[in-house]
Every structure is written in C-alpha cells, then in structure tokens.
Image (cartoon, grey):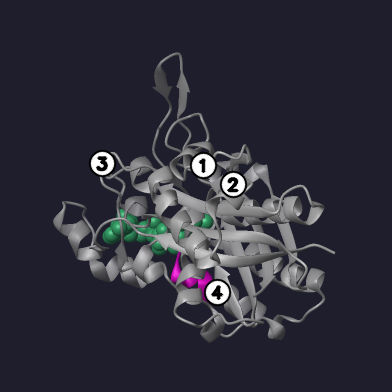
Amino acid sequence: MIYARIVGTGSHLPGDPVSNSDLASRGIETSDEWIADRTGIRFRHFAAKGIGSSDLALEASRQAIASAGIDSATVDLIIVATSTPDVIFPSTAALLQDKLGIRNGGAAFDVQAVCTGFVYALATAEKFIRSGSHRCALVVGAEVFSRILDWKDRGTCVLFGDGAGAVILAASDLSGGVLSSALHADGSHNNILSVPGQVSSGRVTGSPFLQMDGQAVFKFAVRVLGDVAVEAAELAGIGIADIDWVIPHQANIRILQATARRVGIPMEKVIVTVDKHGNTSAASVPLALDLAARDGRIRPGHKVLLEGVGGGFTWGAVLVEF
Ligand code: ACO
C-alpha cells in the first residue's frame, strides 16, 4: 500500500506588512476599524513590481524542499495552484521547475480553482502518488492578487494580499498522510466572484479586475465549508471531534467563526492567519499550514483538515494525518 504523506512545508510573504491604516493613507476611503470589524484583516503583503507568482512559489518551494530534507532532483511532479499566473502560458509550474533547476523531465502543471486551488492541487497530487506513477510531489499555492484588484473598489481591494505556500507530498510505506479528500464545484454560481476580462486579439475585453457579491459569497462559503468538513471526516471514518486542527481558506474571520460554529469545532482548533496575511487565495491554506507546522502546533500524529472555497464556485477539503 502506498501512502501520500506531507513531509515538508514552506511559505513566503513578499515585502513588509501593509496595515489597514497604510491603505487609508494611500488614498483608499476606508479605516482600520471598518476592515478589522468586518473581516478580521489587519495586515497583508504585496509583491513588488516585476515579482510574479513563480518567484513567490520559488521561495516557498525552497523552504519546503529543505524542510523535507530531500534533493530537489527527486521531485517528479509539480502542481501549482494559482489564478494569477506569471503569463497565460507556459504554466507557473513549468516556470517554477526551471527556476528550481529541476531537469528530470517530471510532470508540471497548474490547477485553477481560485481560493480552493491548493486543496484541488493537493487532492490531485495524492492520486498521482497513491497510483504509484509519481513518488515526490511539490504542491504549491501562489498568488499576486494585488495585480487583479481594482484600487478604486474599496469593497474588494482591502481584502486581499500576495504570498505563497508549498508542501512536499511523498510516497511512503508508513500509514497516515492523506486520509480523505472531497472536491466540488457548482458552476451556476460563477458570477458571484470573478475576474471576467478576456484577452482576445491583443486586447483585454471586459474587466480585468476582481468582482464580488460579498454577501452571497459569505453565505455560500459558510454552508459549503461546513458540509465538506463533515464529508471529509466521514470519508476518513473519523468524527469531527477527532480532528486536531482545521485550516480553512483564510477569507474572513467571520466566515471562519460561522463555519466552526456550524460544524461544532472550537475556534481554538482553527488556525487563523487572515489577520496578518489577508486573503491570499490559493496560497492561504499552505501559508497557514507552514506557520502552524513551524511553530509546533501541528505535531506528528495530528489530524489536520485543510479546507477551501472560492470562485467557480469551487470547494473542497483534504484530511491529513501528520
Ligand atoms: N471601508 C469602509 N467602508 C466600506 C468599505 C471599506 N473598505 N467597503 C465597503 N464599505 C461601505 C460600503 O460602501 C457600504 O456603505 P453604504 O452603507 O454607505 O452604502 C457599507 O460599507 C456596507 O457595504 P457592504 O458591501 O454591504 O458591506 P458588507 O457588510 O457586506 O461587508 C464584506 C462586506 C466584508 C466583503 C462582506 O460581504 C463579507 O465578509 N463577505 C465575504 C466575502 C469575502 O470574504 N470574500 C473574500 C473573497 S471570496 C473567497 O475567498 C472565498
């Protein structure tokens, strides 16, 4: 039996933290009080001009490879979750493979499930590892959402930040690792969160900026994050109370609190980074995972539920034993 275990984590946040008051002083008509009360966000990071998702992914990947104690040449699968790729193609994963100097001909591709992207990528990598086709996957969530924000729309531009997180998912004979996964989408809700612009014949048609119906997103997110937590636990044959840590996509503290209440998980078991990172879309779950792994909260044997929800609409969860 082949198990797929997370054996290393890494993350990267670009530049200095930018506070809510910093945003207000840059001319956005907002306040620390409004943003913190409604979202729990206090800081976020922004990548400098010229820095792309593959650059943030590179830093996070180097850390994950070092923490796994492996040679990068053994990575035979790279999956990057991003909605803000460096270019339309090649994939950010292919660019990352080059930047890491990996020349072994392993597979590399991106997945696009917006804020659920990392969960989709991890669940996909697990299937490759368990099938025996690949032995060592680098799974990354990397975003420069600052590039797709309309700085004149105070209802959305204060919510997001840039960053990357990465894990090494390796084949193992030891039981544990990914215990269950569940992935879902309902494309009929595509219009409540989108960047509708298209590149066509050398022109961008439609808005190149993120648009959101915040209240619709809120209600949808709480419902599906709750349901998929229960589903992932049932698939793994464990109870909700057996989960040691929950790492939800970090969109908004009120979504995290409402979901935890709905499922009956105490907030003490929920890893929260939205206050310091804002919403980093596909990067938020692996960023929070790396933080909690490094500060010693996640220990060997712990069962950790990783959950995402985002544009599409997509949602999903992966339950992992460390
Ligand atoms: N600063 C100050 N005032 C603001 C700001 C701001 N940044 N943004 C909006 N306002 C004002 C509005 O103009 C409006 O003023 P008005 O009453 O005079 O018209 C008022 O605040 C209320 O605006 P709403 O949009 O109705 O605010 P709401 O209470 O819905 O809160 C929020 C907005 C925080 C986005 C909320 O809908 C929410 O939490 N939604 C969840 C969505 C989310 O977190 N999305 C993240 C991306 S999706 C994902 O990752 C899955």
First-in-chain label (1 vs 3): 3
Q: Which of marks 4 and 2 is in front?
A: 2
Q: In this view, does 139 lie to the left or right of 164?
A: right
From this view, report whether residue 26 is shown above or below residue 150: below
Dot 1 surroundings within 10 Å: few (below 14), some, or many (20 or more)? many
Which sits earlier in the primary sequence, circle 4 or circle 2? 2
CA distance separating discs 4 and 2: 34 Å
Contact check, label 1 and label 2, Cβ < 8 Å: yes
Q: What's under tag 3, amino acid-wise?
A: Lys
Instruction: Please identify the quarter of the rendering in which residue 87 is found.
Output: top left
How far apart are the two marked residues, 1 and 3, measured between alpha carbons?
Answer: 22 Å
Where are the magenta residues, as a range? 252-258
Q: Mark 2 points at which residue?
A: 78
Whether residue 172 is in magenta: the answer is no
Whether residue 215 is visible, yes or no, is no
Decide which of tag 4 and tag 1 comes sooner along the chain. 1
Disc 4 to disc 3, how far (Cα)? 36 Å
Say which residue label 1 marks. 97
**Residue that numbered label 4 is attached to:** 258
Lower sequence index among marks 1 and 2: 2
The residue carrying mark 3 is 49
- Tell me the quarter of the picture where residue 68 sits: bottom right
Report the residue at 82% width, 76% height from top.
237
Task: Indicate yes or no whether the magenta region holds residue 256.
Answer: yes
Q: Where is residue 89 in the image (x, y as percent from the top left)?
A: 50, 29
Q: Depth check: 239 or 79 in front?
A: 79
Mark 4 or 1, which is nearer the eye? 1
State ligand 1's quadrant. Answer: bottom left
Q: Distance between the residues labelled 1 and 2?
A: 7 Å
Task: Locate residue 65, reporting x and y percent.
Answer: 51, 59
Secondary structure under badge 2? strand
